Amino acid sequence: METIVYHIKENYNLSFHEIGILLGRDERTIWTCYHRIKDKKKQPFTRFPGSIDIPIHIIKNRSVSILESIVLYLKDIQSLSYHEIAVLLNRNDRTIWTVYSRAKRKVPK
């Protein structure tokens, strides 16, 4: 969440209120996320070659976590393997499998 908020704020210069509407979150949550990562992040984000754009609307679904939303999108829509998703998200393959399995149980068919 922090990374997403930071990216939107820095690259699109939207207000916390506007970002909150986009993500379906309270603007106070957005403010907190932004200031947490701003203290950690010293350099701007760079786009990696071969990166995948993730539509903002998939993150708005509050029935699953942000990580679950992203993993579902990458697995079901982009047809990536668990390993490819793990590499993109800097996570373990098994973690991605677990996140995907839990998300599938939460999302109605």
Image (cartoon, rainbow, N blue to C red):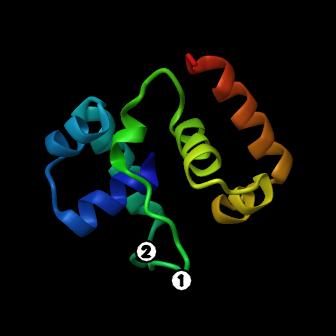
| Tag 2: amino acid | Phe
Q: Which residue is mark 1?
A: 49
88 w.r.t. 68: above or below: below
The residue shown at (68%, 19%) is 105
Q: Do tag 1 and tag 2 residues touch (Cβ < 8 Å)?
A: no
Instruction: Tell me the crowding category of disc 2: few under 14, some 14 to 19, or many 20 or more residues within 10 angstroms, Cα based.
Output: few
The residue shown at (61%, 18%) is 106
Instruction: Tell me the crowding category of disc 1: few under 14, some 14 to 19, or many 20 or more residues within 10 angstroms, Cα based.
Output: few
Tell me which corner region of the image, top left, top right, bottom left or bottom right, holds residue 98: top right
- Image-based side of 67 in relation to 55, left or right: right
52 w.r.t. 2: above or below: below
17 w.r.t. 93: above or below: above
Q: Mark 2: which secondary structure?
A: loop
The residue shown at (52%, 72%) is 51
Mark nearest the camera among 1 and 2 is 1
Q: Which residue is mark 2?
A: 45
Tell me which corner region of the image, top left, top right, bottom left or bottom right, holds residue 50: bottom right
Instruction: Give the CA separation, mark 1 to mark 2.
Output: 13 Å
Tell me which corner region of the image, top left, top right, bottom left or bottom right, holds residue 41: bottom left
33 w.r.t. 21: above or below: below
The residue shown at (41%, 39%) is 59
